[in-house]
Amino acid sequence: MKTEAFWETVKQMSTLTVNSCRVATSQGQETQYFERDQIRNLKKKCERELARLEEKALSLGTDLTPREVSCEEFSLTKSQIRKD
């Protein structure tokens, strides 16, 4: 599953960024530019993954259009169903 690998990459990037910032801060260095660059890198990865998933959804021939239902909306809908 490519999605699982994507989230593992996000987790690794997060850990690397946090640990690097801790070391830099302990040495009296500023980290805002490094953090900004890491966020930009993550944003690019997210955009590529989203495009991949949208393309996959479209190629399946479903009636869904890209971004029709966000993950948050899906999650909220499922939690509402469980409450009912």
Image (cartoon, rainbow, N blue to C red):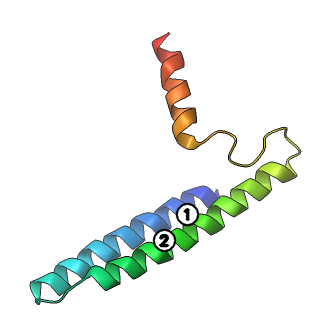
Q: Which mark is residue 6?
A: 1
Q: What is the x, y in percent for residue 21? A: 23, 79
Amino acid type, callout 1 = Phe
- Residue at the image position 33 percent from the left and 77 percent from the top: 35
Horizontal side, residue 25 vs residue 5: left or right: left
| Disc 1 from disc 2: Cα separation | 11 Å
Say which label, 1 or 2, has the lower sequence index: 1
Judging by the rendered image, the residue that carries numbered circle 2 is 42
- Residue at the image position 64 percent from the left and 56 percent from the top: 1
Tell me if residue 16 comes above or below residue 28 in the rendering: above
- The total of numbered circles placed on residues is 2
Q: What is the x, y in percent for residue 44? A: 56, 73
Horizontal side, residue 63 vs residue 53: left or right: right
SS at badge 2: helix
Q: What is the x, y in percent for residue 84? A: 50, 9
Horizontal side, residue 4 vs residue 35: left or right: right
Amino acid type, callout 2 = Leu
Residue furthest top in the image:
84
Q: Residues within 10 Å of mark 1 (few under 14, many from 20)?
A: some
Tell me if residue 24 comes above or below residue 60 in the rendering: below
Q: What is the x, y in percent for residue 25? A: 15, 82
In depth, the one of 62 and 8 nearer the eye is 62
In which quadrant of the rendered view does residue 36 lie? bottom left
Q: Are marks 1 and 2 in contact (CB under 8 Å)?
A: no
SS at badge 1: helix
- Residue at the image position 64 percent from the left and 59 percent from the top: 50
